[in-house]
Amino acid sequence: MRLFIPFIANEKPTCNRFFGHLFKLAGLFTASIYLCMSISVTAAETPRNELTLRQTVELSLQSHPALASYQYRLKSADAQAQQAAIGEKPEINLMLEDALGTGENTGLDNAQSTLSISWVLQGGLLDQRVKSAQSKANVIEIERDIQRYDVAAQTAHAFLTVLAYQERLVVAKNAQQHAVQILREIQKRVDAGRSPSADKLQAEVNLERRELEVEDIQHELKSAKKVLASQWGSANVEFTRVNGALILSEQVINYDTLENEIKNNPQVRYFLTQQRVIDSEITLSREEVKNRWRFNTGVRRYEATEDYGLTFGVSLPLGKSTRNKHQISALSAEQARYMADARAKEIQLSTQLFVLYQELQHSYHLNTALTEKILPRLERALVETQKAYSLGKYSYRQWYALQNEVLDTRMELIDVRLKAHNNLTEIERLTGLNLMELNLMGTSSAKEFENNGDNQ
């Protein structure tokens, strides 16, 4: 069983740290989304007020509607494998000779009756039929794994969407509260004759916009929660919020290590498993055309003398063992096709991984620029602009424009981090390595925005 290995980053991400640090392989390789597919779902009994990423994935893998049919498909495949182990039934034959004829053969006085049993030696054939049926069951298991990876990724995306709206709501509410404070201050300045009434009207419009933005995000958050709950087939949203933070660790595993894990993707393993299925079918076709010995033995009664005798016979079908050569040729071509498909799929997934990794790098650069350079400067500029407005050196419109820029930048930072985590989710789906949950741990970025709201 694989285990999640927690990693908490306390330092702020930087470009140098991003390119200079790698995950420790011993800790990282033991963690992946596939853990959630193989562990017991005891922790995911019912949704709680706050759900973590792991809990939502466990709930989805336990109850997602798309996974329900696989247990029946596997049950059917298992039954077929058991059926394949059942060979041909022995035959009992009764033969009556020299009876009901003419002359000496009138009636049954000189009849000869033989009661015999016959069977075919097919031990090797049965073994190969069982192997062929079991290999098809392996394909179903791979298909189930592919579906589970997709369900886990879909659930993670839905979780991240809820998390992003929660953090946007924190930022929007802070902006709304700040707009209320600004309106009160401007009202005092207008009453004192220090600011024109137009400033008050603009501040009122600003407050209305902030309230509408809060309302809009609240509606979007409700819809996002509904989508998340549907991942485990729930018609109702039985949780209040999700627990996590859209922060980015400064450490990301290097590309070469990620690319090496592509071969473990179930989509690649699907084609490789299909090759093994075809290989078992080829072996079965060769086994089926073999000439098999048929034995029979029995007891014969002679009515004329009332004597008994034993009978024994052996038969062997005639014909060449190459009767299935065309079928074997067709199966060999299918096997080569699956090999080519596996190679094509591996190239496709490797290309997707490269594109996602490049986008992830860009998101890290944007996150570093926004958190360490752009936002701090905008916040300092906002403080200076507010002071200048109080001294009558700046107009309210200039102050208002800078407020909007700070708000937009904070929303942009959430979008950048959301995109990075969505890319990490897709990288996990391609490689099976758990990169995302490590980044969702630590101090909530919503709290970070809440603290920074005092600077507006």
Image (tube, rainbow, N blue to C red):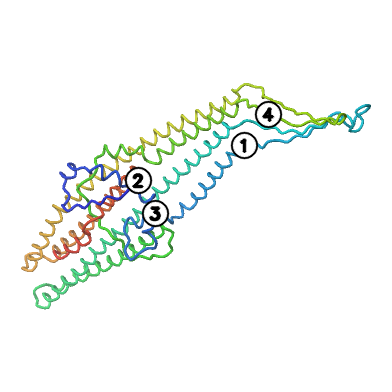
Q: Position of residue 270 (x, y in %)?
A: 43, 39
**Position of 67 relative to 290 (above/below):** below
Q: Amino acid at mark 4?
A: Phe
Q: Amino acid at mark 1?
A: Gly
Q: Nearer the viewer, mark 4 or mark 3?
A: 4
- Quarter of the image with the C terminus is bottom left
Q: Quadrant of residue 446?
A: bottom left
Q: Position of residue 364 (x, y in %)?
A: 21, 47
Q: Element type at marker 4?
A: strand
Crowd class of label 1 (few under 14; some 14 to 19; many from 20; radius 10 Å): some
Q: Amino acid at mark 2?
A: Arg
Q: Nearer the viewer, mark 2 or mark 3?
A: 3
Q: Which numbered disc, 1 or 2, marks the residue that appears first in the sequence? A: 1
Q: Are marks 4 and 2 in contact (CB under 8 Å)?
A: no
Give the alpha-carbon distance from disc 4 to disc 3, as whole Å.
52 Å
Q: Element type at marker 2?
A: helix
- Residue marked by disc 4: 295
Give the alpha-carbon distance from disc 4 to disc 1, as whole Å.
15 Å
Give the alpha-carbon distance from disc 3 to disc 1, as whole Å.
38 Å
Crowd class of label 2 (few under 14; some 14 to 19; many from 20; radius 10 Å): many
Q: Nearer the viewer, mark 1 or mark 2?
A: 1
Give the alpha-carbon distance from disc 1 to disc 2, as whole Å.
43 Å
Tag of residue 40: 3
- Whether residue 202 is visible, yes or no, is no
Q: Is residue 153 left or right of residue 122?
A: left
Residue furthest to the right in view is 103
**Identity of the residue drawn at 93% across and 28% down:** 102
Tag of residue 87: 1
Crowd class of label 3 (few under 14; some 14 to 19; many from 20; radius 10 Å): few
- Whether residue 286 is visible, yes or no, is yes
- Residue marked by disc 2: 429
